[in-house]
Amino acid sequence: MSAAGKSVLVFGAGAVGCLVGGLLAKAGYHVTFIARRRIVEALRASGLTISGVWGEHRVSGPLEAFESLSDIPNAPRLWDWVLITTKCFDTASAAGEIRNLLPGIGFCISLQNGLGNLETIAQEIGWEKTLGGRVITGVEIPHPGEVRVTVHADEIRLGHLRREVSMSAIEEIAAQWRSAGIPVAATEELEQYIWAKVLYNVALNPLGALLGATYGDLADHESTREIMNELIEEAFAVAMAHRVSLFWSDPAAYEEVFYGQMVPPTRGHYPSMLRDLEFGRRTEIDALNGRIVCLAEEKGIEVPANRLVVRLIRYREKEGLGRQKVVSS
């Protein structure tokens, strides 16, 4: 399918944003990246190199990249797709900025982790323009201007949470992305896919970050396995209370798949949350276990294991940010 004339804005172009935006740019789409300075400078100077399990790709520069929307010349523009790839704690501010682009937006597509992103975006621009993509691919930036795909567990699942966007429109976008070399499938079960990833992340991410352990280590030890089971079972109870449809009937069914199929391919991996803590960065705990705690409170459900890991991660965040201030002063 032709990319002629289509414009794409990637807002918060980190690893995932550079990967998807880079492949769209290579396929002929007019892609504009909003990113941090070091990434902007690299994209402008030499373009983008993509490597790893999605293949080897060279996206020749200079690419159009800016640090903020206000830096883009000749605004306003019309954007066929606005991809939000920020961290979850920046979703509200990103959505507020993107609202200023209305009515010149076709669809806004969140490719983020965690719960609550689509609802936040839809509050600003409406459900009729809001889509989401569940990404379960490991991506890293070894150096600005380089993206490496380290793990590919499944296609991007592209869909909606409300029935205000037709499946034919979503399937058309998915077909265009596939033509650009992006593994993606349209789905009517986006909520289930998002929650499936959340169940995986609430069990592995905070515990691995707190203990400095790989996913395989966590699964191998009885003590950490018991904690992960508690985290999963609490998240299941919350989902059931909120009438969320899941792919599994009960926690035991999920845990069988989790330990038998999901963990083994990523046994040697450390959670990205560990890297955030090591570098004194804010984590996405609030959109993962923190969101489970908030949803539990709405229904009067006790989730002590999730509440505990949230408190511990927040302590480590504060400790890391405080250490950064001391070092830089």
Image (cartoon, helix red, strand yellow):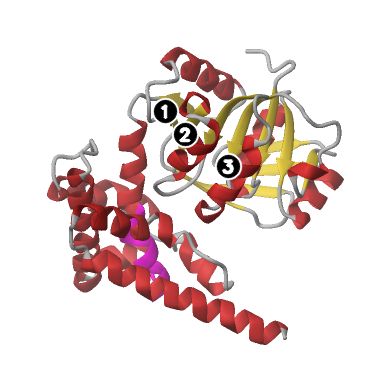
Mark 3, other Cα within 10 Å: few <14 / some 14–19 / many ≥20: many
Q: Main secondary structure of the magenta part?
A: helix
**Does residue 311 appear left or right of residue 272 in this picture?**
left
Number of marks in picture: 3
Magenta residues (range): 201-214
The CA span between labels 1 and 2 is 6 Å
Closer to the N terminus: mark 1 or mark 2?
A: 2
User: Is-magenta flag for residue 213?
Assistant: yes
Quarter of the image for residue 160 reads: top left
Closer to the N terminus: mark 1 or mark 3?
A: 3
- Which quadrant does the C terminus fall into? bottom right
The CA span between labels 2 and 3 is 13 Å
Q: Which mark is residue 160?
A: 1
Residue 222 lies, in percent from the top left, at 19, 70
Mark 2, other Cα within 10 Å: few <14 / some 14–19 / many ≥20: many
Q: Are marks 1 and 2 in contact (CB under 8 Å)?
A: yes
What amino acid is found at the position of numbered circle 2 in the picture?
A: Gly
Residue 248 lies, in percent from the top left, at 19, 40
- Please name the residue that numbered disc 2 is placed on: 132
Q: Which mark is residue 282?
A: none
Q: Between 119 and 47, which is closer to the camera in this rendering?
A: 119
Residue beneath the point at 66% across and 32% down = 23
Residue beneath the point at 56% across and 53% down = 90
